[in-house]
Amino acid sequence: MRILICGAGRTGCHVANVLAAVHDVTVIDRRPQSRLPDAAGVRFVQGDASDPSVLIGAGARDADALLAVTRNDATNLTIALLARRRLGVGATVARVNEPRNRWLFTPEAGVDVAVSTAELIARMVQEEVTAGDLVTLLRLRGPGVAVTETTLPPGAAIAGAPAAAISVPEGAALTAIVRSEHVLLPERAGRLRAGDVVVALCEPGREHVLHELLTQPSGSGPTRSSVAQRPQRVEHDR
């Protein structure tokens, strides 16, 4: 893949070093190339990445993906919008520096994936310290389909039901069961157990419906057998 990275700060340099091992990487920054001492094999273009002529000169028209990772949110939004709407870059990733600006980073603004360090840290902490709570790991294409995980709490009614036989709510699809250090497809996971982490794809607004099904206490809703006997319904995002 041909990847453009806009911003040669610590984040941009690190990402460039990682991606350059398997991709064709070009870095754009206003400052001299000396900011990339360890990026062997990475092409460098000095200039303002929010200038369309600079992006074109760096090869944006032929790029498969663009990462806007400067320290300025307005700059990252401008770059992403130019790349997506004017230059036809296939995929855009933008760094969110200020969490309160997160709502601006949408597909309509040219951002396919918004990355916020604050959000990532919060999710990691939530994942480690909560049991049985819903954790949204990633949203695909802005507000679209979400990748979620739910840890089955002790006493969950769904425990004991075959993972592949669960009738999930419309707009959701189980994708994997994480058990200990193993990642299993639902049809190979057998019966669910307390402590299993259920990974799923959910359409907007369906996350909490699936969460309630997975965490409902035994005796407060559908029995284990009735859940397992209903035909499975899997929705595919297109």
Image (cartoon, grey):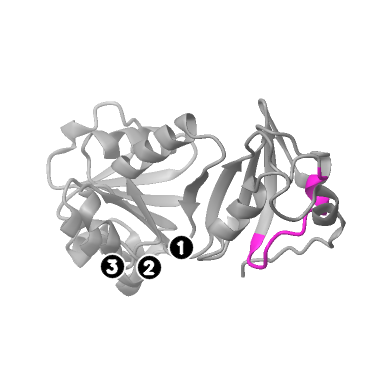
Whether 160 is among the magenta residues is no
Q: Quadrant of residue 167?
A: bottom right
Cα–Cα gap, marks 1 and 3: 14 Å
Specify whether residue 41 is in view. no
Which disc number belongs to residue 81? 3
> Is 100 in front, or is 220?
220
Residue 212 horizontal side relative to residue 18, left or right: right
Query: What residue would you read off at disc 1?
Result: 141
- Secondary structure mainly formed by the magenta segment: loop
Residue 77 horizontal side relative to residue 220, left or right: left
Residue lying at 30% horizontally and 69% vertically, measured from the top left:
109
Q: Marks 3 and 2: which is nearer the front?
A: 2
Residue lying at 32% horizontally and 33% vertically, measured from the top left:
14
> Is 40 in front, or is 204?
204
Which disc number belongs to residue 238? none
Query: Is 48 located above or below residue 183 in the figure?
Result: below
Q: Which residues are magenta?
A: 161-172
Tally of marks: 3
Cα–Cα gap, marks 3 and 2: 9 Å
Which disc number belongs to residue 107? 2
Amino acid identity at mark 2: Pro
